[in-house]
Amino acid sequence: QVQLVESGGGSVQAGGSLRLSCGVFRYAYSGFSMGWFRQSPGKEREGVAAIVSDGSTSYADSVKGRFTISKDNIKNTLYLQMNSLKPEDTAMYYCAAAWVVRGTGLTPDEYMYWGQGTQVTVSS
């Protein structure tokens, strides 16, 4: 069973930065497509950023130019660098892994493995 463990969430003021990390355990990391998703109370889970198996990346329009997804295949770790944070970025953030995704990789239903989530709170 693949395990994903997120860390790095916290509380920041608007304009600040955070870096989320997601460790991948119990399987070779390089074969996966991976993504970051977020969910706020009362809202559906939405794709934030994805990096698919060929290395290409995709971002939700709301985070383009502010967030950067990257991965370290040696450390088996996925990252999400979040800059210029806004109050509307407040959510629980999850990393996820999939064997195969179609298109941008920003669709939650395509992912099989999920972490437990890490909370990000941005105050104005």
Image (cartoon, rainbow, N blue to C red):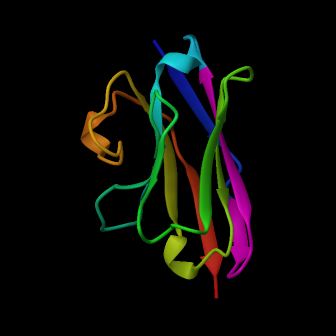
Which residue is located at x 47 percent, y 29 percent? 54
The relative height of residue 117 versus residue 100 in the rendered view (above or below) is below
Dominant secondary structure of the residues highlighted in magenta in the image: strand
Q: Is residue 96 visible?
A: no
Q: Nearer the viewer, residue 95 or 40?
A: 95
Q: Position of residue 118 (x, y in %)?
A: 59, 50
The relative height of residue 50 versus residue 124 in the rendered view (above or below) is above
Q: Position of residue 71 (x, y in %)?
A: 64, 35
Image quadrant for the N terminus?
A: top left
Magenta part of the protein: which range? 10-24
Which residue is located at x 52 percent, y 53 percent? 93
Q: Is residue 45 magenta?
A: no
Q: Nearer the viewer, residue 85 or 121?
A: 85
Q: Is residue 21 magenta?
A: yes
Image quadrant for the C terminus?
A: bottom right
Which residue is located at x 26 percent, y 36 percent? 102
Q: Nearer the viewer, residue 71 or 94?
A: 71
